[in-house]
Image (cartoon, rainbow, N blue to C red):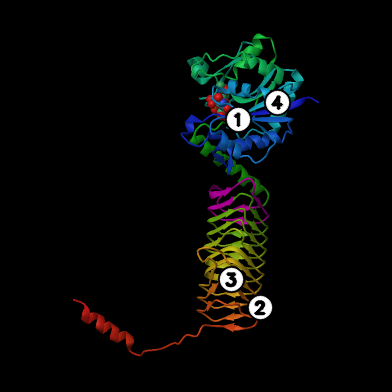
Amino acid sequence: MQELGVVVLAAGQGTRMKSNLPKVLHPLGGRPLFLHVLRTAQRLNPNAVAIVIGHGAEAVRSAYAGNDVAWILQEQQRGTGHAVLCAKEAFKGFKGEVIILSGDVPFIREQTLLMLVAHHRSRNAAVTLLTAFLDEPKGYGRILRDDHGNATGIVEEKDATPAQRGIREVNAGVYVVSASFAFAALSEVKNHNQQGEYYLPDIVAIGLAQRADIETVRVDDVREMLGVNTREELAFMEKDLRQSINKKWMLAGVTFKDPDTTYIEDGVTIGKDTVIGPNTQLRGKTVVGERCQIDGSAFLTDAQIGDEVHLRFSVVMTGCRVANGAIIGPFAHLRPGSNLGPNVHIGNFVETKEAKIGQGTKANHLTYLGDVTIGSEANIGAGTITCNYDGFHKYNTTIGDRVQVGSDTTLIAPVSLGDDVYVATASTVRHDVPAGALVYNQRDERVREGWTEQKRKKMKGSKK
Ligand code: UD1
Ligand code: CA
């Protein structure tokens, strides 16, 4: 078996992004640019992967959790050729091909890379490069060919003559090289060009001078090779990615009321016959079940939603679980650790956090439920607050099955209400309440007849 290696170039600053953030860390579909490339590369099960980092090296490194890649530091960004040469040691004694990818070309497909490798091996080539025909080739290296159509080299935009700039065939920046050839050729590359850089594409001319075989393969779908160099391009690709993800879910049986305003990250899954309203964002590892209804303006991150859940207009949910048949919102905020059982109802202006809520329990209005466990079929009245924080520590509240909490109740944690407890309205509960008990605060209600009129007269008299 011939070995297969991968080098991902990710050391450049990305000057044209005008950013303090290294370009390859700019997120596309919620994931840093270079991680798209890395993920595609890893699907090929390569024997070795090296990532060349430089600008913002530590930040780039910490954006990837795995430990199955070699990080190569390119201290000064002296060009793409120099960047690959920095990885030479990582491929010492390597017998086979290396795929070279750019960290800023995120849509390159696994199939294209496989096809490139197969072509390279079948021709026993030194370099096989991917090319594309662009209507607007500006910014890319142009492919030079002789009268027979054989590639003779690549000229960068900045070094090109006006005539060469008219060439529409460009270098996609994706290469398969034979390791032994490439690292030797790279040490011969000079930086005699407009940018004073060591250009990777110069190995083509070096190979041709040695009569080595240089192959080109044309990519069908140019979107695959588009690089992100500016924020405008990033936005364009974000839109493109969004459309393809939405299309995938529509084909899988999900209805979108307005695909243009629906943002779904690629780690999300959605069940059949779910209907999604406008301005919805499903992020991270969010899972939405079947036959759910999302009215709109939902912002869900790592949320797990069962089947037939109704998210009414405007909900924010993060790191939480919601079982089948629940109804949430409008205007509800489910924070991390919220775990709602089947058919739970959470209404407007209700916030939950670390809240385990049992089947059929309702909290429909203006309530804060934090660090709490609630049983099933309970009813939490309007304006109930679990007072879980004393400024130093957080405390838990426990509420049993079928408990009725009257409106305007404050539960001072740590506190526990047994099953079937009845909390009278406007109670402050400081002590545990046994099952089946009524709890209330003694408070007199007094009425003064005619008080309002007297008050108004007095106030008028005092007005100048
Ligand atoms: C490069 C190619 C160009 C091709 C285009 C396709 C060169 C000289 N030109 O141009 O022919 O059409 O890609 O997208 O290769 N990088 C490093 N270290 C460096 C310089 C760059 O790691 O010293 C990395 C960058 O982070 C980036 C990649 O290499 O991920 C490409 O560099 P970039 O400057 O974007 O090259 P282009 O001008 O786009
Ligand atoms: Ca680029």
The residue labelled by disc 2 is 419
The quadrant holding residue 58 is top right
Name the secondary structure under disc 4.
Answer: helix
From mark 1 to mark 4, how far is it between C-alphas? 13 Å
Q: Nearer the viewer, residue 105 or 405?
A: 405
> Residue 405, relative to residue 49: is it above or below?
below
Name the secondary structure under disc 2.
Answer: loop
Is residue 209 found left or right of 448 in the rendered image?
A: right
Q: Position of residue 99 (x, y in %)?
A: 68, 26
> Residue 273, relative to residue 449: is it above or below?
above
Q: Earlier in the sequence, mark 3 or mark 4?
A: 4
Q: Nearer the viewer, residue 366 or 295?
A: 366
The residue labelled by disc 1 is 225
Which residue is rendered at x = 54% and y = 47% of the image?
260
Q: Residue furthest front?
A: 392
The residue labelled by disc 4 is 116
Q: Amino acid at mark 4?
A: Leu
Q: Earlier in the sequence, mark 3 or mark 1?
A: 1
Q: Is ligand 1 less than 8 Å from the beta carbon at label 4?
A: no
Locate the N terminus by quadrant. top right
Q: Amino acid at mark 2?
A: Asp
Q: Closer to the observer: label 3 or label 4? A: 3
User: Looking at the image, do the residues carrying marks 1 and 4 touch, with CB atoms under 8 Å apart?
Assistant: no
Is-magenta flag for residue 280? yes
The residue labelled by disc 3 is 414
Q: Closer to the observer: label 3 or label 2? A: 3
Q: Quadrant of ligand 1?
A: top right
Please state the extent of the stretch shown in magenta in the rendering.
Answer: 254-282
Q: Closer to the observer: label 3 or label 1? A: 3
Q: Position of residue 132 (x, y in %)?
A: 61, 25
From mark 2 to mark 4, how far is it between C-alphas? 67 Å
